[in-house]
Amino acid sequence: MDTANEFPFKQRKYMPVFPRASGKPTIYIEGYPCEDDEPMAATGFHAEQITTFSDQLSRYFEINSHIYIGIDSFIYYREGDITKFVAPDVYVVLGADKNPQRRSFYTWSEGVVPTAVFEFLSDATANQDRHGKARLYMVDIGVQEYFIHQPDMERRPEFRGWRRNPSGGMKEIAPDEQGGLFSEALNLWFRWEEQLTTQVRLLRPYLPDDTPITTSKEEHRLRVEAQALAAEEAERRRTAETLASEEAERRREAEAELERLRAQLADRQEENA
């Protein structure tokens, strides 16, 4: 894909349509803790997955100033009750202002709840992520879609998703033949691939036409490769132009020599006449 031209076009084409949040961005509300003693990622597998995945989503949604992406931060969903909070690995809020960054996300103040939530399974939280959190996110909070994924290649593959139905219940999303799940809310496919060098089973987003969304590092590498190819093509063009110029000069010299010889022959013929 020509990332310099095709991706921005597709980015605009497939961007989801949604209403603006009714509240306002809130950095911090006094009395609501915004951090705990837990590390952001349970393992290196989770750190790689969260970093890569959040970077891809941030890059894709960067053109819309009303999409907020949260990473391992508290979501408070009941005003006045500091015990009613969750801290998903990654979540996307359609309609909420991208900036400023928040210490926590307060649903009543923002006037919107997260649209999609992603949890990456660890041994300590896997059972809760599969069962209790699904109902909490989708029924109690009102999240539209919820996904869980196992990034550790030493564990069996597990990628599941649920969608909230109009009645407020939840239904599991059926995978395609490759095990991918489609997010209707975000208008994106999600598929995993195994990275043998890092031993991480990475969940990645794709456009509806299966165009992969690259990370910033991948995009930088693609641009460097494209610049190198452009430089090589420019060098070949300059070489070809030089050779063509040299050939044209040789042709002019040959024509001039031929003209000189003709003139010399004509002079001799006149002398002999």
Image (spheres, rainbow, N blue to C red):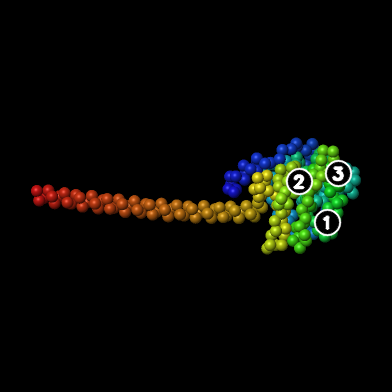
Which label was assigned to residue 139?
A: 3
The percent position of residue 157, horizontal first and vertical second, equals: 76, 57
- The Cα atoms of the two marked residues, 2 and 1, are separated by 21 Å
Q: Earlier in the sequence, mark 2 or mark 1?
A: 2
**Callout 1: 10 Å neighbours few (<14), some, many (20+)?**
some
Which label was assigned to residue 92?
A: 2
- Image depth: mark 2 or mark 1 in front: 1
Which label was assigned to residue 60?
A: none
Q: Secondary structure at mark 3?
A: helix
The percent position of residue 43, horizontal first and vertical second, equals: 77, 61
Residue 138: quarter of image: top right
**Callout 2: 10 Å neighbours few (<14), some, many (20+)?**
many
Q: Is residue 97 left or right of residue 82?
A: left
Residue positioned 86% across, 51% down in the render: 131
Residue positioned 65% across, 43% down in the render: 11
The amino acid type found where label 1 is placed reads Ala
- The Cα atoms of the two marked residues, 3 and 1, are separated by 19 Å
The amino acid type found where label 2 is placed reads Val
Residue positioned 64% across, 55% down in the render: 217
Q: Earlier in the sequence, mark 2 or mark 3?
A: 2
The percent position of residue 16, horizontal first and vertical second, equals: 71, 40
Residue 140, visible in the rendered structure: yes
Residue positioned 49% across, 53% down in the render: 233
Q: Secondary structure at mark 1?
A: helix
Residue that label 1 marks: 126
Residue 65: quarter of image: top right
Q: Are marks 2 and 3 in contact (CB under 8 Å)?
A: no
Q: Are marks 3 and 1 in contact (CB under 8 Å)?
A: no
Q: Secondary structure at mark 2?
A: strand
The amino acid type found where label 3 is placed reads Val
